[in-house]
Image (cartoon, rainbow, N blue to C red):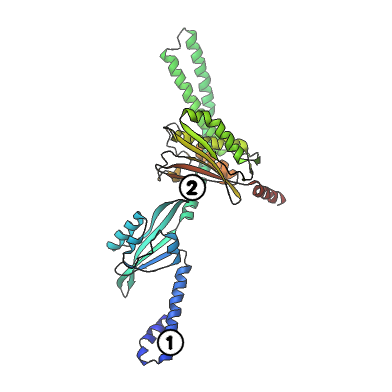
């Protein structure tokens, strides 16, 4: 069709009015088809002329890229892009006449982080560069899937390692602890006072044995199947009791802990013991982040068929390069941490058929949000499994 139109255009001087009108109709249809194809793509496309001015874009580009579409005819394309990092990348690539594919960028938005993959390449026609093509792809879901797969792989490798650690370390630790106690009694029997350095050293050994035991216990919890004992559970009552439980401790640390509860929120189907421990760990993490005082908010909301339970603080926040790793086994920023606390939290939430996510911004605080199925949905799932 395009070749026919090209040849026909060369003969317009010999055409009558009806033939010219027919040719214009064909050109219009061809142009509309091209527009429809571009708008049907899930990948955003920007086309620039040799002066780097935007001349065409599709709907996906409008949806994905933070872009200012007013006065685009008077400014180069990078001056219309709101995100500074993306704008600088596009400008540098175009001005250096380079081709760059699949450069990834992260956008922090109110609803969470989005990840974009951007490619910049020359628009070549008749063996000459006649402009630039920029493609933008939203890879947020893809990145999320990669993170989830990596967590699952990490948990699988953790299973084998933890089993080995449990067998190889736990029993010897028990023997060491017994002999330390015997050594302490023998030392005291010889008239050595409690202030003696030898007894202090034995106390340090006891503390380290206890710490190793806790690590082993954490490993075992992380790898053993979680045996849920679910029952109807009111998220508001759970958060209310946790706020009361931590109130005195928070006051001593000059931390204000409060609840923002959705009173219309239905009950969930969950194991109170495991969920309580999960949120205790999240609250303790928030308190640790507020070493100079601050506030913690326990919030409940309904999100479709899920109950959304969040623990938020106004602490220093978590660096962007750390966020993707916090649910991975062994990763910790604490000196005495095992790196398994959030891994176990992730496991408990997944066993409940829910999800856990974190949002954080440096200087503005951190929010962990746990989504759990509400009671009606959970009951339908159980009924279906029993019937099948």
Tell me: residue 196, above or below residue 114.
above
Tell me: residue 368, above or below residue 170.
below
Q: Pointer 2: what residue?
A: 150
Rate crowding at label 2 as few (under 14), some (14 to 19) or many (20 or more) other CA atoms within 10 Å.
Answer: some
Which one is in front, 318 or 161? 318
Which one is in front, 102 or 246? 246
Q: Pointer 1: what residue?
A: 21
Confirm or deny contact between disc 1 and disc 2 (CB under 8 A): no
Where is residue 71 shown, x and y percent of the image? 35, 65
Can residue 303 be seen at all in this image of the molecule? yes
The answer to which image quadrant residue 333 occupies is: top left
**Residue 289 appears left or right of 279:** left
Gap in angstroms between the C-alphas marked 1 and 2: 60 Å
**Residue 352 appears left or right of 31:** right
Where is residue 115 shown, x and y percent of the image? 43, 54
Residue at the left extreme?
96
Where is residue 87 shown, x and y percent of the image? 34, 58
Which one is in front, 85 or 80? 80
- Count of numbered badges drawn on the protein: 2
Residue at 34% across, 63% down? 77
Secondary structure beneath label 2: helix
């Amino acid at each position: 069709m395009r070749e026919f139109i090209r040849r026909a255009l060369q003969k317009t001087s010999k055409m009558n009015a009806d033939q010219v009108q027919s040719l214009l109709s064909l050109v219009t249809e061809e142009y509309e088809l091209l527009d429809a194809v571009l708008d049907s793509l899930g990948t955003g496309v920007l086309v620039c002329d040799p002066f780097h001015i935007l001349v065409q874009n599709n709907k996906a580009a409008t949806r994905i890229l933070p872009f200012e579409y007013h006065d685009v005819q008077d400014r180069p394309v990078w001056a219309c892009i709101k995100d500074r990092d993306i704008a600088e990348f596009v400008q540098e690539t175009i001005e250096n006449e380079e081709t760059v594919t699949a450069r990834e960028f992260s956008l922090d938005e109110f609803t969470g982080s989005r990840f974009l993959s951007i490619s910049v390449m020359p628009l070549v026609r008749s063996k000459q560069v006649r402009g630039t093509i920029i493609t933008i792809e939203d890879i947020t879901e893809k990145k999320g899937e990669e993170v989830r797969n990596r967590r699952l792989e990490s948990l699988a490798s953790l299973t084998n390692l933890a089993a080995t650690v449990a067998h190889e370390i736990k029993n010897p630790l028990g023997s060491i602890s017994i002999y330390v106690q015997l050594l302490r009694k023998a030392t005291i029997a010889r008239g050595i006072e409690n202030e003696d350095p030898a007894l202090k050293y034995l106390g340090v050994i006891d503390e380290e044995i206890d710490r190793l035991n806790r690590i082993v216990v954490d490993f075992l919890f992380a790898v053993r199947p979680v045996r849920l004992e679910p029952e109807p559970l009111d998220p508001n009552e759970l958060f209310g009791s946790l706020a009361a439980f931590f109130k005195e401790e928070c006051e001593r640390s000059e931390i204000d802990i409060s609840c923002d509860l959705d009173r219309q929120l239905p009950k969930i189907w969950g194991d109170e013991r495991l969920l309580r421990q999960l949120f205790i760990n999240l609250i303790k993490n928030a308190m640790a982040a507020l070493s100079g005082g601050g506030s913690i908010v326990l919030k409940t909301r309904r999100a479709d068929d899920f109950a959304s339970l969040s623990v938020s603080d106004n602490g220093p926040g978590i660096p962007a390069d750390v966020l993707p790793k916090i649910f991975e086994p062994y990763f910790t920023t604490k000196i005495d941490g095992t790196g398994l606390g959030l891994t176990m939290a992730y496991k408990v939430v997944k066993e409940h058929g829910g999800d856990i996510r974190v949002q954080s911004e440096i200087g503005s605080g951190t929010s962990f949000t746990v989504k759990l199925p509400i009671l009606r949905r959970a009951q339908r799932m159980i009924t279906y499994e029993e019937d099948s």
